[in-house]
Image: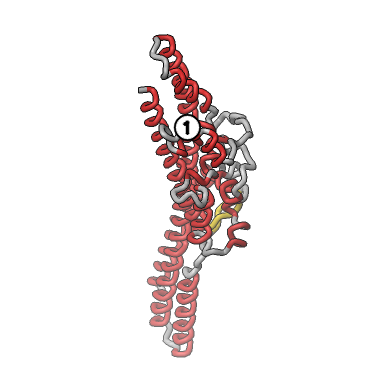
Amino acid sequence: MKNLFCCLVILGLVTSCVSKKNQVINQNILTLRDSYCKAPFQYNYATKIPSYNSDSIIMANKELRGIFSDQSILILNALNNLDEVHQIIKLKKDSSLSSQVKVLQLKSVINSRITIALTELDAVAAEFDCEGERVAQIGNYVDNLNDSRNNKMILYSIIAGASASIAGGIVKNEGWSNAIDISGGVLGAGFGLATLNPKGKKVEFIHQRNLLRDIWNEKLESPNFPPFIWYMYTEKKFSNKEKHSIISSMKERWLHYQFDDDKNAADHSVIFSDGGYYRANDLHNRAAMLNQMQSATRTINQNINYLLLDLDKLIL
């Protein structure tokens, strides 16, 4: 009986420690539940998206193709800088000092708009990064909750088996001894089966400013993205093969890898809602999707870098 009492005391102490740890974890989850990544000031961007009639834009400016790539021409159009470029080309035919000064002034106007575009890219990429880190943190907490629960069930199973063995040795009656052994085995098996919970625990996670929803719907229905960034996401000319836009290709990958080609499940996923109760797997999927969009956003810098190189060639 003394050994059985010791087992029960140990069980109580372990349970108390696990409970306190879970309280700390739950407090940490509350601090991560609502987004701290959105900007404190909401800028009201113009809602007009640049024209998607890319072939017509390129043909209307075909004289620029010897200097600029098609992508650069489209970016200049999106930034409303094509007029300045045409003026620079005309002024370059005049070598006077006044013409050179005007060229530099026009280039300054173009550079100013490019700088704004670059800061918009950095801001969007930074928010994707912050949201990804926020989701990853709460995902780790949920993993810890699930691991703690499983460890507790395993410990209960071991203690149940040990207690049954001790009690069976103490009880002299063979019938009672067998009953205790069987009960201990069933109880231990029950605790063991309790660890086989494939979905695990859920936590509430809120994201009313959902950066992934517009991407999934392929519609800019919120002020989450500046029009220039959205144009770069959705214009096919800026993708590798020019058959699908950046976000269209991203959506295909999400559907295949995150949702096992189940579009109905994806359309109704908590990931694209205002938030709700998440399981660990959904949190890890959301973190991966945010990180992928961060990378896709940063790759747009390559297109702008090529434009800057083309501009330098024009000026020099």
- Work out which quarter of the rendered image holds the N terminus and state it: bottom left
**Measured from the top left, where is residue 174 in percent x and y?**
44, 90
Q: Nearer the viewer, residue 30 or 161?
A: 30
**Residue visible at 49% across and 24% down?**
86
**Residue visible at 46% across and 77% down?**
189
**Measured from the top left, where is residue 135 in percent x and y?**
49, 48
Residue furthest to the bottom in view is 174
Left or right of 310? Residue 267 is right
Q: Nearer the viewer, residue 110 or 193?
A: 110
Q: Which residue is mark 1?
A: 63
Residue 4 in the image: above or below residue 304: below
Q: Residues within 10 Å of mark 1 (few under 14, many from 20)?
A: few
Quarter occupied by residue 171: bottom left
**Measured from the top left, where is residue 77 in percent x and y?**
53, 32
Quarter occupied by residue 278: bottom right
Which secondary structure lies at badge 1? Answer: helix
Q: Amino acid at mark 1?
A: Glu
Q: Nearer the viewer, residue 67 or 300?
A: 67
**Residue visible at 52% across and 57% down?**
252
